[in-house]
Image: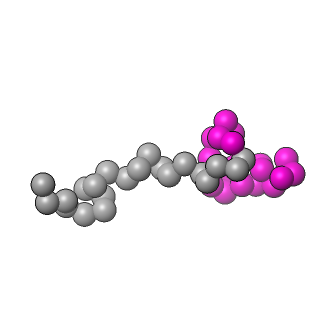
Amino acid sequence: RDPQSLKALIGIKGAPAAAPAGTPAPRPAAPPPAAAGPKPT
């Protein structure tokens, strides 16, 4: 929970500093279904 660790985490995960420390880094804008594979509609 040290500011240094937080900075490292933010740098590694690229998570916005605004995100709470206890929150798992927000997924990169949830990849579109197309990225995961064509989804039969």
Q: Is residue 5 above or below residue 16?
A: below
Query: Is the residue 6 above or below the residue 19 in the image?
Result: below
Q: Which residue reaches farthest bottom?
A: 37
* Nearer the observer, 24 or 10: 24
- Check the picture and name the quadrant holding the C terminus: bottom left
Check if residue 6 falls in the magenta segment.
yes
Q: Is residue 38 visible?
A: yes
Instruction: Tell me if 21 is positioned left or right of 24 in this view.
Output: right
User: What's the magenta region?
Assistant: 1-20
- Residue 4 lies, in percent from the top left, at 85, 51
Residue 17 belongs to magenta span: yes
Closer to us: 26 or 22: 22
Q: Residue at x 72, y 55 (%)?
A: 9
Residue at 72% across, 47% down: 21
* 1 sits left or right of 36 in the view: right
Above or below residue 30? Residue 39 is below
Residue appearing at x 67%, y 36% in the figure: 18
Question: Would residue 13 be found to the left or right of residue 1 on screen?
Answer: left
Q: Quadrant of residue 37?
A: bottom left
Q: Position of residue 2 (x, y in %)?
A: 87, 51
Residue at the extreme front of the image, as rendered:
22
